[in-house]
Image: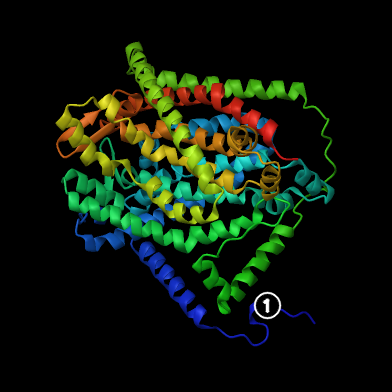
Amino acid sequence: MTNYTPPALAGQRLPNRFDGAAMLLVLALLIALVEVGRTTIGTPIAQIENTPIHLDPSWLPYYALRSTARMFAALSFSLLFTFTYATLAAKSRRAGMVLIPILDILQSVPILGFLTFTTVFFLHLFPGKVMGAELASVFVIFTSQAWNMAFSFYQSLTTLPADLQEASRSFRLSAWQRFWKLDVPFAMPGLVWNTMLSMSGGWFFVVASEAVTVGNTQFTLPGIGSYVAVALAREDLPAIFYAILAMLVVILLYDQLLFRPLVAWSGKFRFETTAAISGPEPWMLKLLRRTALFRAIGEAIGGVFAAIFRLRLSLRQPSQVDETREASRFVDGLWFVAIAAIAIYAAWQIVNYVSATLHWHDLATALLMGVYTAIRVTVLMIIAALIWVPVGVWIGLRPKATRVAQPIAQFLAAFPANLLFPPVVLAIVYFHANPNIWLTPLMLIGTQWYVLFNVIAGAAAFPGDMKEAVANFHIHGLLWWRKVMIPGILPYFITGALTASGGAWNASIVAEVASWGHEQLAAQGLGAYIAQATASGNTPRVVLGVAVMSCFVILFNRILWRPLYAYAVRRTTLG
């Protein structure tokens, strides 16, 4: 007779004191979810319109709960998007030809560009209800999270070691089994780090996602972003300090409760042939492993998922793949013609819409503003690479340093540029400085961390046997960088640089326009062009600005990042 008793309860094991501590955490989470749902589902939007945002610090725990719930909701959609979109792009050569350029465009579209076209849609989807505004906010946060995670997962799938791929074919795993047994585990270390970065990216745009003004459409959702927006408008420095403190507390909480255990857990998926040196377990992971009841529940749920992942879910028996077979040129030709036709039609529709109200000089202005922003992005990317590649490698190779740097980097990556507006604007006005130069560093605040996090992930995933071989051959100095570490982290660095480049364009809408009370500064650039057009409700100018920005980003990626990425995959993939 089959024994269905969970292993954790075998031998008459009963709930212990660790279960009590875990129960408190679970109850707190459930109460928080119920509170968020109670104030979201079915609530009339007029209720939040008539409820002001209070700057009293006692309201910050509630606002922090609402903002964090939106971010985790967006993170769930981002994971679903990553597992489907990036997998299709990596597994299908023809699909990748379309999906990756589309991903380049999507990551370059400013958040205000998404707001312009999606806010009205979600508000009409749930007319008169808060749910529509909440979905609009979650979607905006999703756009600041999903692209980075998708690029990370795509990078992992395209750099799978050849011997692991051959093993999966030898065991005749179906596509479903291979995905859960090979693809996801191999990508997990990098994906966890980029998930942390995506979570921080949501904080960076929290003001734009909760305090929305698009033409005549305005709504302010309760949250830290709205709190910051009101504090900036009222020039309330103590309130801004309280908001920073609340963000720090929230980031530390989900770092300790979620991401630190995830990083430790993902370490078991590192690809290496020697025993890894394991560091001390996070306290949350120890707590969960020492419980009896919760561990039994977890093992039961894990057993169900493991059974699902083992299902073949294939209509035919997988066969050996002929690696020498060439793709059909005729089918490729038809595919290219179809893509070109769709692209030409989309471009024609954009031109028709924009040309109805704008003229050639508007296009020239947008292109000139794009050149200004492109110069800023290029300079900032060089600075970010020179600073954070050595730092990221140093941190990633030292587990103790990683544990210390992880929450610090998360907080710095989450720090919204808006919170630096008061000192920056006042300093520029006081010293009569040039906004075109001194507003530029604000773009670096949110983009440099893409490089740092990916380099840390690459260095942390560097195989232990390779480290031992390098130590045995006494390779040091410049030779170590040229022949060992740079090739080892190159796919990760390029993924980070690619998303940082797109993120810098996106961040320009926040960094090129700064205000503090009645003082407003604007730098010449495409971000300021789009931000001002969005605030005035000039949709044709928004469309033109977004289209020009997308063209610049695609040009950058086609000329620089994609060839570098192809080189990294070709020369540095193990096996």
Q: Quadrant of the N terminus?
A: bottom right
Q: Who is closer to the viewer here, 369 or 156?
A: 156
> Does residue 166 appear to the left or right of 236 in the view shown?
right
List the single residue furthest toward the bottom: 12
Q: Quadrant of the C terminus?
A: top right
* Depicted 213 relative to depicted 401: above or below: above
Residue marked by disc 1: 7
List the single residue furthest toward the top: 360
Q: Give SS at disc 1.
A: helix
Say how the picture is coloured: rainbow
Residue at 69%, 80% (x, y): give it.
5
List the single residue furthest toward the front: 474
* x and y percentages locating residue 251 in the rendered image: 39, 56
* x and y percentages locating residue 519 in the rendered image: 16, 34
Residue at 78%, 25% (x, y): give it.
328
* x and y percentages locating residue 179 in the rendered image: 69, 49
| Neighbourhood count class around disc 1 (C-alpha, 10 Å): few under 14, some 14–19, many 20 upward | some
* Residue 369 seen in render: yes
Q: Who is closer to the viewer here, 471 or 199?
A: 471
* Depicted 127 relative to depicted 246: above or below: above
> Does residue 572 appear to the left or right of 531 in the view shown?
right
* Residue 45 seen in render: no
Q: Who is closer to the viewer here, 369 or 141?
A: 369
Q: Amino acid at mark 1?
A: Pro
Q: How many marks?
A: 1
* Depicted 447 relative to depicted 286: above or below: above
> Does residue 125 appear to the left or right of 305 in the view shown?
left
* x and y percentages locating residue 337 in the rendered image: 65, 20
